[in-house]
Image: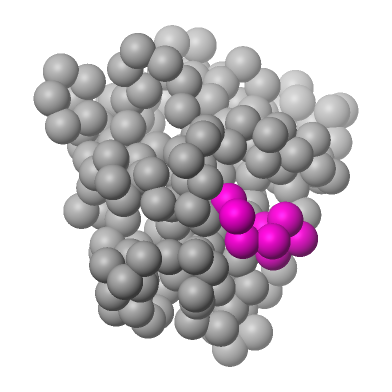
Amino acid sequence: MFGLSRQERAVFRKLTSPLKIQNFLDRFPINHEKGRETYMSPRVTLRAGKMHCFEGALVAATALWLHGQEPLILDLKTKDDWDHVVALYKIGGRWGAISKTNHATLRWRDPIYKTVRELAVSYWHEYFDNKTRQKTLRWYSEPYNLSKHGANWITAEEDLFALAERIDNSRHLAIFPPRNWRYIRKADKMEVKAGKLIEWERRDHRT
């Protein structure tokens, strides 16, 4: 059981489906990384009681792995914006995503996407800079299988900076050809207004 304690196994044992995993992640405050940047392992994340997208994706991937699916990660890479990381799952030949985010968008994806590219571009329109209104999503990774690194990342006490770097440096594919940039429309006023909606305020002591 990947070195998990009895209490940790009890938590993951209940997460028998992607939907249950997503509902579990939604209960956690966002990790605003107050004081320092973190890349906590699933063990440390559960102990901390908060998580950001990378940490949530690792928790989700662990649960999927324990219940027979591969621990797959999708990295969404941007230009001049925060990247986003989700855990991938597959049901009935269709891809979906489990996501931890503080925003109204960039969230869960139902298993309806025929390809990983279809899933990745579903995040396109809502991924923009609130100040410039420019769309910022540029690349998406091929599914990154965490099992290639064994299982020590699940219970590591130290931050997983090296793992995050390997995912970031893995093969990524362009969302669109550069020549199409001049046809990209900026987010409109209503989209910007919706984009400012967040779930957890930084001043919340739980974050």
Where's residue 171, x and y in %?
Answer: 84, 44
Q: Is residue 71 visible?
A: yes
Where's residue 7, x and y in %?
Answer: 27, 67
Please report the bounds of the magenta region as a residue range: 146-153
Say which residue appears at 32% left-offset and 25% top-offset: 32
- Residue toward you, 172 or 137: 172
Above-or-below relation of 131 to 100: above
* Left or right, 206 with reference to 103: left
Say which residue appears at 22% left-offset and 20% top-offset: 202
Residue occupying the far bottom of the picture: 92
Q: Is residue 134 magenta?
A: no
Model colouring: one colour
Say which residue appears at 74% left-offset and 48% top-offset: 141
Where's residue 70, x and y in %?
Answer: 63, 73
Q: Name the image quarter holding residue 138.
A: top right
Where's residue 41, x and y in %?
Answer: 48, 46
Above-or-below relation of 65 to 120: below
Q: Name the image quarter holding residue 169.
A: top right
Say which residue appears at 56% left-offset and 21% top-offset: 81
Q: Quadrant of the C terminus?
A: top left
Main secondary structure found in the magenta portion: helix
Q: Is residue 148 magenta?
A: yes
Q: Is residue 175 visible?
A: no
